[in-house]
Image (tube, rainbow, N blue to C red):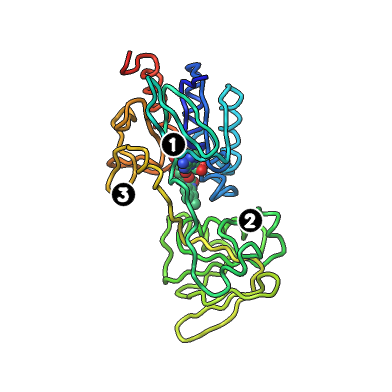
Amino acid sequence: MRYDLIIIGAGPGGLTAGIYAMTRMMRTLIIDAAEVGGQLVSLYPDKAIQNYPGYERIQARKLSDKLYAQAESMGCEFRETEKVIDINDGKEELIVITDKNEYRTSSVIVATGMGMFKPKKMGCRGETEFENKGLCYILPPKEDLIGKKVVVFGGGNSAIEMALIADSVTDTAIVHRRNEFRCDESNTNALGASNIKAVMSAELLSVNGDDRVRSVTLKKGDETFDVAADIVVILIGISSDLDDLKRWGLELTKDGLLMVDDAMRTSRKGIFACGDVIDYEGKYKQIITACGEAATATNSAYKFVKKPYWA
Ligand SMILES: Cc1cc2nc3c(=O)[nH]c(=O)nc-3n(C[C@H](O)[C@H](O)[C@H](O)COP(=O)(O)OP(=O)(O)OC[C@H]3O[C@@H](n4cnc5c(N)ncnc54)[C@H](O)[C@@H]3O)c2cc1C
């Protein structure tokens, strides 16, 4: 059996490509190394997204669920927890090799976003010991925070947005190593209007506890002090692993992202791309841009499948 299109990555870009492919009646498979939803589900499921047209506010996980439901109801097939390892040339087809299977297809859209991403670690005492015992790198669901003391570490938009979510249900503090936040003005304003206690210019020395986290030790100037904590959320950035792209023989930018032309064609015939994995001048990494590029990529894939270079 051969697919018309295989989409690698089920974030908003990949899911939108799936929806567009189904409107063109393309036999489509979407493969994701993790679960469906991309960054919306893996990194900020509880965040209220306010810039996706058509919704004044929508929880990230709900937006992802809606895209998933739409693609699935239209007939897209899905494989989760299956990582694409290689894309080989077959005879008038492409062969997508995963860690579990191999699939034949006429075209591919790469929508792998930031690749396999991992949260950055603090490297302080107690970090490894208390991981999953109160210390985490993604804010737990709101219902698990009620009645707990939450301490968030970080100074960017993600850290502030997660602290605001926690503050809506429980006692929350945010600790940043600099003396000012690096974030959107709307977030600074929201922080100022909230009950969040901000501790600036402070360094995390250790996470302390017994069978789970009980406190953190901070250093601010010459002073060292403890802050009670039940949940410690570390949001100091993400390191992404884009090594897959190097294996796939596609032309890359100096930052290791995919080069595409205006039609979202990569340097390999029959392989297109969209979303955070591609780069061009003026690129703005957002859900809406990933979705817009997905529409173009799918249109190009459709034209290619109807009239491939070998026809
Ligand atoms: C904290 C934070 C908050 C944000 N807030 C907003 C916001 O409010 N509004 C907004 O518009 N944007 C926001 N963004 C940006 C937005 O999330 C991204 O631009 C968007 O997710 C990109 O979508 P994508 O489909 O390109 O990739 P992703 O969402 O990264 O999805 C890529 C998928 O590909 C999979 N994958 C990777 N490699 C492989 C492989 N080898 N095989 C199979 N699957 C693979 C991954 O598992 C992942 O599921 C935010 C980002 C962050 C980090």
- Image position of 114 with respect to 129: above or below: above
Instruction: Identify which residue, 128 or 186, lies in the foreground.
Output: 128
Looking at the rendered image, the disc whose residue lies closer to the viewer, 2 or 1, is 1
Residue behind mark 2? 140
Residue behind mark 1? 111
Badge 1 residue CB within 8 Å of ligand 1: yes
The residue sitting at 54% across, 61% down in the picture is 193
Residue 283 image-quadrant placement: top left
The residue sitting at 61% across, 30% down in the picture is 69
Please rate how many residues cluster around mark 2, counting C-alpha atoms within 10 Å: few if below 14, some from 14 to 19, many from 20. Answer: some
What amino acid is found at the position of numbered circle 2 in the picture? Answer: Pro
In the rendered structure, the answer to whether residue 254 lies left or right of residue 289 reads left
The residue sitting at 57% across, 68% down in the picture is 128
Residue 292 image-quadrant placement: top left
What is the C-alpha distance between the residues marked 2 and 3? 32 Å
- Image position of 82 with respect to 137: above or below: above
